[in-house]
Image: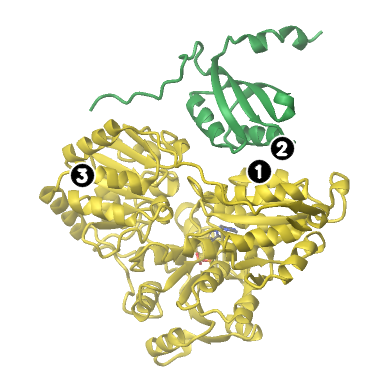
Amino acid sequence: MPPIEPVKLSPAPDKPNKAVLELTVNNHPGVMSHICSLFSHRVYNMDGILCMPVKDGQMSKIWIRINGNGQLEQIVKQLQKLEDVHAVRYHNAGHEIFIALEDSFKVI
Amino acid sequence: MYKMNGAQVIIKILERYGIDIIAGIPGGSNLPLYDALSQSTTIRHILARHEQGAGFIAQGIARSSGKPAVCFATSGPGATNILTAIADAKLDSIPIICITGQVPQAMIGTDAFQEVDTYGMSIPITKHNFLVRTAKEILTVIPDAFRIATEGRPGPVLIDIPKDVQLELVEFDNWPEVPRRPILKSYKDKDIQQAATMINAADRPILYLGGGIIHANASGAATRLAEKNALPVTMTLLGLGSMPSDHPLTLGMLGMHAARYTNLAIEECDLLIVAGARFDDRATGKISEFCPAANVIHIDIDPGEIDKLRTAHVKLVGDVGMILDELLPFVKQRKRNEWLTRIKTLRDEHPFLSPGAHDPLMPYGLIRQIADIVDDSAIIATDVGKHQMWVAQAYPFRRPRQLLTSGGLGTMGFGLPAAIGASLAHPQRTVVCFSGDGSILMNIQELATAVEQKVNLKLVILNNTSLGLVRQQQDLFFGKRYFACEYQNHVDFVTIAKGFGMKAFDLSESVTPVAALRQAILAEGPCLIHVPIKRNEEVYPIVPPGASNKEMIGGEKNAAN
Ligand SMILES: Cc1ncc(C[n+]2csc(CCOP(=O)(O)OP(=O)(O)O)c2C)c(N)n1
C-alpha cells in the first residue's frame, strides 16, 4: 500500500501548526458566536480574530490566526460546514494582516 | 397577494411542506403560533407533557419515517427543556426543526420574564439556528431550515421567533419553495477505482456500516456490495437493521458490547470499508489499537468525518448509497472461502451467549419472545442502559428504521416519547419500547400523552431496581463500591400506569407469561408490561471504557459470568 498522503493545504504551511484564515461570512449578529462556538466546542486554538462588515454590510470578513496542533485541515473542514460561511481561504502564519496590527497591541 | 401575520405564515409553510404532526407545549411567547395552529385543518397537534417529550416525539417521527419533523416550545423554560432532545438529534444526525417562541424584540436583553438566550444556547447543539427579526424573513428561514435539516448530513435546526415577529403583518406574492442544492461530491472516478482495487486485493476485508446508511436509504446498496464481494458486515448501534441480523454475512454490532467473535474478526481485518460511520469510541474502543494494520476506505457525506479520528487511504465524500453503487461494477464477484471460514471458526469458538434466552422473565428471553410475537414491521424503541444493549445484541433487526435508540448522546428518557412519535407516524404498526426503571422515570409524564393519543405502544420495563449500567460499571471498574445506583424506593409502575389510564400488568405474576405477553402485545392500544429482573443480570461482553476492543470482559464460552 502506498503511504497515506495528507490533504494538501496550499500554500503549504510556513510554520507548523500556525496559519491565518480568511473567512467570508453572512453578516448578522450571531455569526461571530457561531465561529467562536465552533472553536471552543472542538478545542481549536485561535489567538487572534478580526471581523469587519464588507459589501454594504451584507457580508463580513473574518480573519483568524490559529495555533492548532495538527488541526488545520479539520478546522478548515468544520468551518466550511457552517451555514453562514461562504468561503475559507488559507494563508501562511506570516500574513501581513496581523503583523500590521502589532503596534495597536503593544502593552505599555 | 397574501396578507397575514408571521405566525400564520409559519403554519401555512409547514402545511405546504407536508408537516401533519407537531408536538409541543404552548406558553406566553408562542401563543400567536398556537393560535395560528388552531386554525390548521391538516396539522395535528400533539400536546406533550414536557418539552423534552415533545422534542423526542418529533425525533420518533423523523427517525421512523426518514422525514423532517417539527416541535414547538415557548421561551425560557420551554426552550431549556427541549434542548436535550435537540442535542440528541445533533449527535445522531436526525432532521428535526424546533420552533421556539421568544420574548418581544424590544425586551430581548433585559432579563424579561421567561427570557433566555435560546439562540446562543442552541448554537453548539444544532446544525444551524436562526433568530428571526422580521416576519418577512420567515418566508426564507423556514424553507432554509428544511433544506439544512435534510441536506447532506441531516441534523436539527432551531428557529427562535420573538412574539412581536409572530404578530407582525406581512404581505407577499408567492409561497417559497424548498431550496435544493446539488449533493456534495468530492471524489473522482479514479478514487472509486482505487477503492475497488483495494477491495479486490484485500484478503480479510470488513464492511463497517453506521447510521449514515440508514439516513441515506443505502442498505440495499450496501447489501449488494457485500454480497457480490462476500464482505463480512458489522454495524454500529445506529447502523443496526442496515443488513438483516440473520444474513450469512452479518457479524452484528461491533464495539463495547459486541459479541466476542465480532470484535475478534474485525481485529484481524486487513481492509476496513467504513460507510456512513464515524469511528465513535463506543464502536472502536481505544482508537489507536483499532485494527492498526488495516487499510481504510472511508465513505461519508460529511467531509469533517474523514481523517477526524482515523486517517483514510481512500476518502470518498458524497452520498453513501450512490458511492456504494458506483463501486459495485468495479468490485469482483468473490467467495472468500478462507476469510469466511476463519470467521466461522471465531464464531464457533467465541459465540454470542444469551443466558436465559428461553425464559421470558429473563432479559434475553423476553426480547426473543417479543421478537417472535411481532413481525418485522414493528418498530422497536429503547431507553438507555443495560436493557438498550441487550436489545441491540439480541433483537433480530431485519430492516432499516426498525430500531430507534439514542446512540451518540445516550439520553435516558428517549424511549417513551420517541416510541409515541413513531406510533403517531405509523399508526398501523406495533411499537415496542424497552425501558429500564431508571430511564422511564425521566419522561414518565408522557404516559399521559400516549393514553390521550391512543397510540399502539407496548412499554416493557425491565425493572432491576437500579441504574443498572452504572451499577455494572461500579461492579467491574470501581471495586464493587455501589453508590447512588440502587433505588431504595421501589416504584409501583403498574399502579402508576393505571393512574394515567393505561392498561398495565406484571409479567412475573402471570402463570402463563408467554401467553400473557402475546395477548398484551397483540391487543390494540397502549399497555405497560412490568418485568422484574435481578440486579445482577449483566451485559456481556463489555470492553472497559478507554480500552482496546480486544480486552473484552465476560461472555466467554465455557466460563460462568
Ligand atoms: C439523562 C441521563 N442521565 C444519566 C445517564 C447515565 N446513565 C447511563 S445508563 C444509566 C442507568 C440506566 O438505568 P435504567 O434505565 O434503569 O436501565 P438499566 O441499565 O438498569 O437497564 C445511567 C444513569 C444517562 N445516560 N442519561
Q: Chain of mark 3?
A: B
> Which residue is label 2 attached to?
A30
For ligand 1, tell me if the residue under mark 2 lies within 8 Å.
no
Q: Secondary structure at mark 1?
A: helix
Q: Residue furthest front?
A: B1
Nearer to me, B401 or B468: B401
Name the kind of residue labelled 3 in the image. Answer: Pro
Residue B329's mark? 3
The structure residue drawn at horizontal position 56% and vertical position 47%, both measured from the top left corner, is B179
Q: Quadrant of ligand 1?
A: bottom right
Residue A100 left/right relative to B229: right
Q: CA distance from mark 1 to mark 3?
A: 43 Å
Q: Position of residue B410 (x, y in %)?
A: 52, 56
User: Which of the image's four quarters has the C terminus of chain B?
Assistant: bottom left
Q: Are marks 3 and 2 on the same chain?
A: no
Q: CA distance from mark 1 to mark 2?
A: 9 Å
Q: Position of residue A68 (x, y in %)?
A: 54, 23
Which is more foreground, mark 1 or mark 3? Answer: 3
The structure residue drawn at horizontal position 62% and vertical position 26%, both measured from the top left corner, is A24
Q: Chain of mark 2?
A: A
